[in-house]
Image (cartoon, helix red, strand yellow):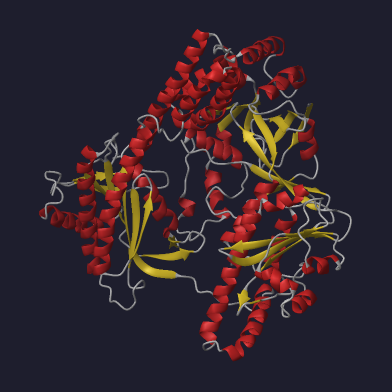
């Protein structure tokens, strides 16, 4: 372990205004909570050590760190999951996380030189961009604005030999306290208004108005660097899959080759990835894609495929082909294998990429001299097989679609006599696309000036109910364990490990505590790992207990087969509610389509929400009249009222009574929507993107202005809008629906409290007529 200060490029800007103080006070508070718990000997020793140090040297500062080295060493061993291994890249940093003052030797060896930060390669969301003091900004949002913790790990690379190796820096701010100096700054999102897409420049005004100098950061950070190589390759392959149309030409090939080179970072080892597209049962070869291929090079292909030789037979029935690899790995002898051996390749492996029984690509790994492929190398390649198969399939589908478009729009039906010509043209086209010498324009699917309809039916307090259901089931499981522990203590035939008892009491406290969802993964790990180990040891020591233990094991199954499960009751009740909602929405959609052809898409949450878009551009052949909007709105309110009524009467028949809330949002002006291929859905286009989507996502949590009452309530329909001219038309519509008996005629009108980035929203609320079941 080393004590020295090293800077880390973490986008922290020390301009003299950031206020930070090194301190052990947060750590001491943590130890004070631990020392009174049973079995916490190490925290107690740590607490006593820190107290002695404080008495002698005061709190830590940049000048007295050497006096606290033994405390820092103890922190290292206290850290959860950190072994006593100097190869672990672990360190302690300043509270604003741009410098590390203590850590393992391997940590400093990695970060001191040529350790480069990389930016997100595919930023889509507001907080995906890198910006100055991002770590601190997100930490403040989490601590003071009740924002769900946002992933803030930073990624780096270091060049080892000729290859890049990727790492991820995990920052733990557990022992950092933040105090506000003066008035809390506000978050102002006005810079996002009227923006079709969010760029980094749009975030700058938000950050400039949010003054971090008004906060004092006190304590220290824990820094852990982990190997991120496999995850980086996986993310980038997935990015290629999701955005296949972007990666064409030399840029796409360079990106692909860079990714593939990272799978096996061995000097002398080369790779080749080749997607196989067949037209008229003949693979299309592209010199640009296949230039690194061994098996598909021109001379071998034309000689052995067209003559239906060894290569033809292999592509018709592909298997893993390998030679010159670690003993026992080589595949069976074949003519193709002999041909490849004679080409000068020393070590070789070819992995066929097969999707839905169709060969969609080949991935080759080989070396001409020096390095010999090993079993572990092939296992490493095999771990990415599914992603490479998916990528090859997406490339094939993309090119096939483009080729089909060209053939359909430029040529007549294919005739056998001219099939070769089409193959020739297609091969030329593929090469042109890869080299950007020819671009096939793909029209973006956009529907302009359509009217949106949105509604959400939610299960009231679903998160709370789910947690309580889980809690009830976990208590039953804990009772089984407690009875077993009690029986063992009485019989005194098996000495129970004290650490297990401490762990059991800890889990018991979590289950009974307020933040069950926070500890759920640890609780499940206890049942799946600790309990299994405990039962295994018990069976080994007391063989005659095995039948009882098998029965005990079955009672602890997460499926709850052997006892009455609250979670199962909740899920079945939720399923019944959603089925009722879904059935009514299907009827609503059918009615809407009979009025005017529209686009309808629903989304499953703990309830169901939907988007409906209608307008002339969706159905150009059917005249659209604005008066249809009122009829659709009326049908929407009727449908939501029916849903509210049916779920109300369903409640008494459910194993766990669930209530629903009903919400409609009215956006009176038309918008543009476009189809997003990456998400396979329509999304709002243009300046409405931010405001419209944000309103939809946040209004279900809205409160009535100057009150503590939520707008959405069971047995009612809440309708949110923002423009005054909507009010008159909406009241008239509600009056018509009330006359039909679906809702009460009394209308409540409210102003809503401001939400983050949203203001001046209004709402009407009506009661659903629940007087009869019909």
| Residue 315 in picture, x, y percent from top left | 68, 69
Is residue 52 toward the left or the right of residue 39 in the image? right
Residue occupying the far front of the picture: 544
| Residue 167 in picture, x, y percent from top left | 70, 43
On the image, which quarter does residue 686 sit in?
A: bottom left
Quadrant where the N terminus is found in the figure: top right
Q: Nearer the viewer, residue 380 or 74?
A: 380
Q: Is residue 541 above or below residue 273?
A: above
Residue occupying the far bottom of the picture: 417
Q: Residue at x 68, y 14 (%)?
A: 58
Is residue 562 toward the left or the right of residue 337 in the image? left
| Residue 402 in picture, x, y percent from top left | 56, 75
Is residue 734 toward the left or the right of residue 537 in the image? left
Q: What is the number of callouts on the image?
A: 0
Residue occupying the far right of the picture: 370
Q: Nearer the viewer, residue 662 or 381?
A: 381
Q: Nearer the viewer, residue 674 or 746?
A: 674
Q: Is residue 267 above or below residue 114?
A: below
Whether residue 452 is visible: yes
Is residue 50 toward the left or the right of residue 741 in the image? right
Q: Nearer the viewer, residue 614 or 282?
A: 282
| Residue 535 in picture, x, y percent from top left | 55, 23
Whether residue 294 is visible: no
On the image, which quarter does residue 114 sit in?
A: top right
Q: Residue at x 45, y 59 (%)?
A: 194
């Amino acid at each position: 372990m080393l004590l020295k200060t090293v800077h880390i490029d973490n986008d922290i800007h020390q301009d003299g205004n950031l206020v930070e103080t090194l301190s052990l006070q947060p750590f001491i508070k943590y130890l004070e909570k631990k020392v009174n718990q049973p079995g916490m000997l190490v925290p107690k020793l740590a607490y006593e050590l820190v107290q002695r140090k404080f008495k002698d040297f005061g709190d830590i500062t940049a000048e007295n760190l050497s006096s606290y080295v033994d405390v820092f060493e103890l922190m290292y061993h206290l850290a959860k999951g950190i072994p006593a291994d100097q190869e672990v890249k672990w360190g302690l940093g300043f509270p604003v996380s741009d410098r590390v003052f203590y850590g393992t030797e391997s940590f400093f060896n990695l970060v001191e030189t040529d350790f480069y930060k990389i930016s997100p390669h595919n930023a889509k969301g507001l907080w995906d961009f890198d910006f100055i003091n991002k770590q601190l900004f997100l930490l403040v949002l989490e601590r003071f604005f009740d924002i769900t913790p946002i992933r803030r790990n930073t990624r780096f690379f270091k060049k080892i030999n000729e290859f890049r190796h990727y790492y991820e820096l995990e920052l733990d701010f557990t022992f950092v306290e933040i105090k506000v100096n003066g008035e809390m700054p506000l978050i102002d999102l006005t810079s996002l208004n009227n923006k079709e897409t969010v760029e980094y420049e749009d975030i700058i005004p938000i950050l400039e108005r949010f003054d971090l100098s008004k906060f004092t950061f006190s304590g220290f950070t824990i820094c852990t660097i982990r190997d991120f190589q496999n995850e980086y390759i996986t993310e980038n392959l997935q990015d290629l899959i999701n955005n296949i149309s972007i990666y064409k030409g030399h840029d796409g090939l360079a990106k692909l080759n860079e990714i593939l080179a990272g799978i096996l970072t061995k000097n002398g080892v080369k790779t080749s990835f080749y997607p196989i597209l067949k037209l008229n049962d003949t693979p299309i070869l592209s010199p640009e894609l296949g230039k690194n291929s061994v098996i598909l090079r021109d001379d071998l292909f034309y000689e052995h495929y067209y003559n239906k030789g060894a290569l033809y037979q292999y592509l018709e029935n592909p298997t893993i082909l390998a030679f010159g690899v670690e003993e026992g790995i080589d595949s069976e002898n074949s003519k193709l294998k002999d041909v490849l051996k004679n080409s000068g390749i020393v070590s070789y492996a070819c992995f066929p990429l097969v999707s839905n029984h169709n060969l969609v690509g080949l991935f080759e790994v080989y070396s001409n001299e020096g390095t010999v492929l090993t079993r572990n190398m092939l296992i490493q390649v095999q771990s990415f097989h599914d992603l490479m198969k998916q990528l090859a399939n997406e490339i094939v589908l993309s090119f096939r679609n483009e080729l089909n478009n060209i053939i359909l729009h430029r040529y007549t039906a294919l005739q056998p006599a001219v099939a070769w010509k089409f193959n020739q043209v297609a091969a030329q086209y593929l090469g042109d696309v890869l080299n950007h010498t020819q671009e096939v324009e793909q029209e973006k699917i956009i529907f302009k000036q359509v009217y949106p309809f949105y509604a959400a039916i939610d299960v009231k307090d679903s998160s709370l109910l789910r947690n309580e259901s889980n809690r009830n089931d976990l208590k039953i499981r804990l009772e089984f364990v407690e009875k077993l522990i009690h029986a063992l203590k009485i019989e005194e035939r098996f000495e129970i490990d004290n650490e297990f008892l401490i762990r059991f009491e800890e889990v018991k406290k979590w289950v009974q505590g307020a933040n069950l969802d926070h500890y759920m993964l640890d609780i499940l790990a206890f049942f799946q790992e600790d309990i299994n180990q405990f039962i295994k040891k018990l069976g080994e020591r007391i063989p005659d207990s095995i039948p009882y233990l098998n029965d005990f094991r079955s009672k602890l199954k997460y499926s709850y087969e052997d006892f009455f499960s609250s979670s199962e009751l909740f899920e079945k009740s939720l399923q019944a509610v959603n089925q009722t909602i879904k059935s009514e929405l299907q009827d609503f959609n059918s009615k809407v389509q009979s009025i005017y052809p529209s686009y309808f898409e629903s989304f499953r949450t703990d309830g169901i929400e939907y988007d409906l878009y209608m307008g002339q551009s969706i159905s150009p052949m059917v005249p659209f009249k604005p008066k249809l909007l009122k009829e659709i709105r009326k049908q929407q309110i009727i449908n939501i009222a029916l849903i509210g009524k049916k779920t109300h009467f369903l409640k008494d028949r459910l194993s766990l009574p669930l209530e629903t809330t009903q919400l409609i949002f009215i956006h009176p002006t038309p918008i543009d929507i476009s189809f997003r291929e990456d998400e396979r859905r329509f999304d709002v286009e243009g300046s409405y993107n931010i405001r419209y989507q944000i309103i939809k996502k946040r209004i279900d949590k809205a409160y009535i202005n100057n009150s503590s009452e939520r707008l959405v309530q069971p047995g009612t329909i809440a309708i949110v809008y923002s423009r005054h001219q909507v009010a008159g038309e909406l009241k008239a519509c509600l009056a018509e629906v009330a006359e039909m008996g679906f809702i009460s005629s009394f209308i409540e009108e409210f102003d809503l409290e401001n939400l983050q980035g949203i203001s001046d929203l209004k709402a009407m609320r009506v009661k659903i007529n629940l007087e009869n079941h019909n």
